[in-house]
Amino acid sequence: MRKIWVLDTTLRDGEQSPGVSLTSTEKVEIALQLQKLGVDRIETGFPATSPGEIISMQEIAKQVTQATLVGFARSKEQDIDAVREALQGAEDACLHLFLATSPIHRQHKLRMDKAKVLETAAAAIRYGRKYFSKVEFSAEDASRTELDFICEVVDMAIRAGATVVNLPDTVGYASPDQFGEMFRIVKQQVPGIEKIQLSTHCHDDLGMATANTLAAIRNGVDQFEGTINGIGERAGNTPIEEVALALDTRTELYGAQTSLVLEELYATSRLVSKRTGMSVPGNKAIVGANAFAHESGIHQDGMLKERTTYEIVSPERIGLKTSKLVLGKHSGRHAFKEKLADMGFEALTEEQLQEAFRKFKDLTDKKKQVLDEDLLVLMDESRNASPQIYTLDSIQVSYGNQSVPVASIRLSKQDGTAIDEVAMGNGSVDAIFHAIDKASGEEVELEDYSIQSVTYGKDALGEVHAILRQGEYTALGRGTSTDILEASAKAYIDALNKLLGRKEVHGKRNITIS
Ligand SMILES: CC(=O)SCCNC(=O)CCNC(=O)[C@H](O)C(C)(C)COP(=O)(O)OP(=O)(O)OC[C@H]1O[C@@H](n2cnc3c(N)ncnc32)[C@H](O)[C@@H]1OP(=O)(O)O
Ligand SMILES: CC(C)C(=O)C(=O)O
Ligand SMILES: [Mg+2]
């Protein structure tokens, strides 16, 4: 299988992401992790940028010994000298020179004609080769450069002594077919091309960095450059994890592999995200939080029967323990039953399961994600079911800090009849309880009332406990909901039902029924 070299530029192009600036300690930490990941070449910085950049690169050079360390420079002696200073302690160093070659950059930015570009780059490569055995030359904006001039530039770079020639899609303008064709022609037409390594470096302005990189690989490049999580200038660089996994997953198509330790990808992604402050979108390929999570019932059912129905990469391959089956609005009975079994609720009858599933679906209409804690509460409610003498149909509360709270409530009785009542109170909860009292016609006393949040987040479930007394009898009721007024009504009705049910059957005295 053909080996593809990986040049990681998270610490150089990645750090060019607007708003990102890494400290020396952070850069060393990331470089050590990149070494663990098995990156062949780590671009540690652009030392002409600042004195601090040189110090960071020197620190990395002291500690990272198993990868080639690359220093970036314009085609200027002063920049090359800065790379010499920054990489002097490196075991294996490479100078990375660049100069733009496209008409737009030549005319407007560099104000150089073609001949001057060739002369400037050749002089820089020759100067660099005096100090470095490895010199990469990048023809910036290659994808917008005339094809015959690109061939001239590559020829010049080889003659001047470059060991790697990189043709970047600097502004993410290329399309895969066109980009692949450029490499095919360069390989065909430039004499001595076999003496050097050909590289590519893509940006994601049109969302095609990975596709363009793979097109270059199919057309014979030896190295690709990218960053972890795809961070970098503007829309970012090629995400290394995407290309590495595409090669690993489709070997029959590409016939090429990196030597990355893929199991380190997830940890590397998390570290880069934490240190740069650039969060990874949930739906990001390979390393996003949802990349191995399934919420839809049909997908979850498929996953439970055979993982490969909905996963082309196994989570273990990138260093994650398992896939996740997330319970939510779109989940089905198979995943629900599996989840309950995992939590120890195995001995449920079909009826209990159906009832729990119905309640679960009701909850998903109110809550985005159902957590284990939510399920525990829900199962607890089901198992401790009280006689359904009254059930809550609807509730409406009118509250204002200048007016008296009013609650309207509709209860259903066991025989199916509905009772509507309206009542006022000192507060919203008090108004609800008065309305329930009026609807039931029972005289009860509220002995205790408490609220607690049982799950997390803005849409957390609140659990209300209410203890009611009627003469010698007391009963504890529980109610849960994402709304505490609804939870309060449910708890009150639950206590009332228990009180009436027990009173009727047992006639026991002074007993709190839980
Ligand atoms: C595609 C890429 O990612 S390229 C890398 C981009 N990264 C960065 O620019 C980050 C670090 N940059 C910096 O800190 C600064 O730009 C520095 C220190 C490098 C240079 O700063 P300054 O000397 O103030 O120049 P400034 O950035 O304003 O302009 C760039 C100059 O470099 C020239 N230049 C640009 N690319 C090259 C090159 N490859 N070789 C030689 N000269 C170049 C420009 O034409 C311009 O020259 P001019 O002053 O004669 O017009
Ligand atoms: C490799 C360099 C020149 C680069 O970052 C680019 O062209 O995007
Ligand atoms: Mg770039």
Image (cartoon, grey):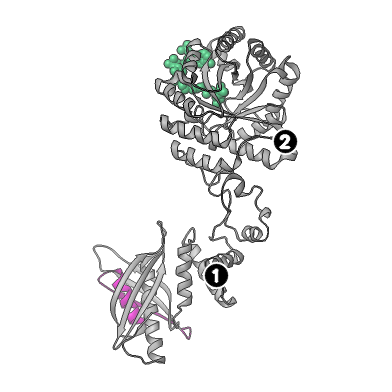
Quadrant where the C terminus sits is bottom left
Q: Position of residue 67 (x, y in %)?
A: 56, 28
**Disc ID at residue 70:** none
Q: Which residue range is magenta in the image? A: 414-439
**Disc ID at residue 254:** 2
For discs 1 and 2, the disc positioned in front in the rendered view: 2
Tell me how far mark 1 sits from mark 2, CA to CA.
46 Å
Q: Nearer the viewer, residue 251 or 116?
A: 251
Q: Is residue 230 visible in this depiction of the protein?
A: no
**Disc ID at residue 357:** 1
Q: Position of residue 386 (x, y in %)?
A: 44, 81
Give the image quarter of residue 167. top right
311 is higher (above) or lower (below) than 514: above
Let me know if residue 420 is in the magenta part.
yes
Q: Is mark 1 within 8 Å of ligand 3?
A: no
330 is higher (above) or lower (below) than 384: above
Question: In the drawing, does residue 439 fall left or right of residue 400?
Answer: right
> Which element carries disc 1, helix, strand or loop?
helix
> Which element carries disc 2, helix, strand or loop?
helix
User: At 51% from the left edge and 44% from the top edge, which residue is drawn?
Assistant: 281
